Amino acid sequence: MIQEILILKDGVPLFWYEVVESRLKDPLLSSGFLNAVFQIAKNELKRGISTIKMGSSLIHLKEFSPLLVVVVGDDDGEIEAVAERIGMEFLKEYGKHLNGWSGEVSMFRDFSEKISRILGRKVTVQRELEDTLNKILSNSPSKKGRGKGTLLGQAGLSQ
């Protein structure tokens, strides 16, 4: 399952899409680190790096010059395919704006709708299941009297 997507330019996140609670707690710090690892492998070691395994998560790195697309998930085939599609779609939509880019990321916000369509029904089904479980658990007898709150992480989308 896809967990989150980052699109970087020169190590700076242009776009961040969170499907489930983020594994990367600080997208700016993570972006710089992942970009540095990718560039060292490419330039110094003359070998590319495509996937990093961290615990149960896989971090896939795909270059679309001048971008680096980062997809975090748990299925290697799925994250590779999603990274490929995201990179091509992002360049198609925003490629002409990348030369001379001013640093303003708000222009990329609408790309979250495209990602939702790319990821398709999987995200919707997961959210529906989480919402249903949260409703069931919040109405359970053991929950009553302890105040409100979510019991499961909400699948949120953000840039």
Image (cartoon, grey):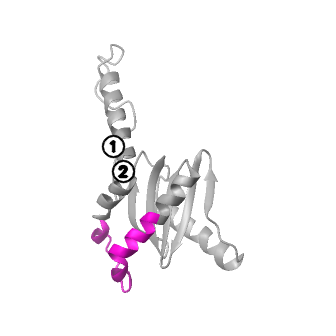
What residue is disc 1 on? 124
Task: State whether residue 29 appears in this view.
Answer: no
Q: Which residues are magenta?
A: 85-109
List x then y, in percent, for residue 131: 31, 33
Residue 157 screen position, x and y as percent:
33, 51
x and y, in percent, of residue 90 in the image: 38, 70
Residue at the spot x=33%, y=17% of the render? 140
Q: With 150 as the anchor, is 29 left or right in this view?
A: right
Name the front one of labels 2 and 1: 2
Q: Nearer the viewer, residue 58 or 120?
A: 120
- Disc 2 residue type? Gly
Residue furthest to the right: 45
From the viewer's perspective, tell me whether residue 92 is left or right of residue 63: left
Within-10-Å neighbours for mark 1: few <14, some 14–19, many 20+:
few
| Label 2 – label 1 distance at C-alpha | 7 Å
Residue 68 position, x and y percent, is 50, 70
Return the mark for residue 120. 2
Q: Is residue 118 above or below residue 89?
A: above
